[in-house]
């Protein structure tokens, strides 16, 4: 997996797609891209499963994905 990050910004390139994240003071905005609908769905699942795993103490609610 290829990762790039800087102040409040990060990008992860998975085999299924790319996730670009921008952290604000109150929210984390995530944009995902995939070659097709299946790859896009898989990329969203990878991101969400990792966030749930790493934020287990914070009672993270399901992500509200927008198309």
Image: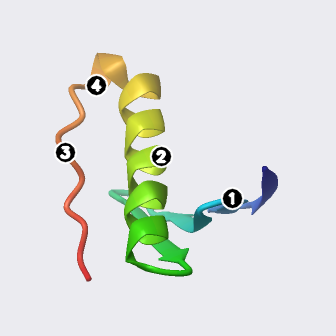
Residue 60 in picture, x, y percent from top left? 24, 34
Which residue, as the protein is rendered here, is positioned at the far top?
Answer: 57
Q: CA distance from mark 3 to mark 4?
A: 12 Å
Q: Which mark is in front, 1 or 3?
A: 1
Residue 12 in picture, x, y percent from top left? 68, 58
Q: CA distance from mark 2 to mark 4?
A: 19 Å
Q: CA distance from mark 1 to mark 2?
A: 11 Å
Q: Report the front residue among 1 and 54.
A: 1
- Residue at 47 percent across and 49 percent down: it is 47
Q: Which mark is in front, 1 or 2?
A: 1
Q: CA distance from mark 3 to mark 2?
A: 13 Å
Q: Which mark is in front, 3 or 4?
A: 3
Residue bearing mark 4: 58
Q: CA distance from mark 1 to mark 3?
A: 23 Å
| Mark 3 or mark 2, earlier in chain | 2
Q: Are marks 3 and 2 in contact (CB under 8 Å)?
A: no
Question: Which quarter of the picture shows residue 53?
Answer: top left
| Mark carried by residue 62 | 3
Q: Report the front residue among 45 and 63.
A: 45
Q: Report the front residue among 37 and 65.
A: 37
Q: Is residue 27 above or below residue 37?
A: above
- Residue at 26 percent across and 83 percent down: it is 67
Q: Are marks 3 and 4 in contact (CB under 8 Å)?
A: no
| Mark carried by residue 15 | 1
Question: Which quarter of the picture shows residue 55?
Answer: top left
């Amino acid at each position: 997996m290829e990762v790039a990050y800087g102040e409040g910004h990060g990008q992860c390139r998975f085999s299924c797609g790319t996730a670009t994240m921008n952290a604000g003071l109150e929210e984390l905005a995530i944009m995902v891209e995939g070659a097709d609908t299946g790859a896009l769905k898989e990329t969203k699942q990878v991101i969400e499963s990792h966030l749930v795993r790493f934020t287990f103490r914070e009672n993270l609610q399901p992500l509200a994905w927008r198309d």
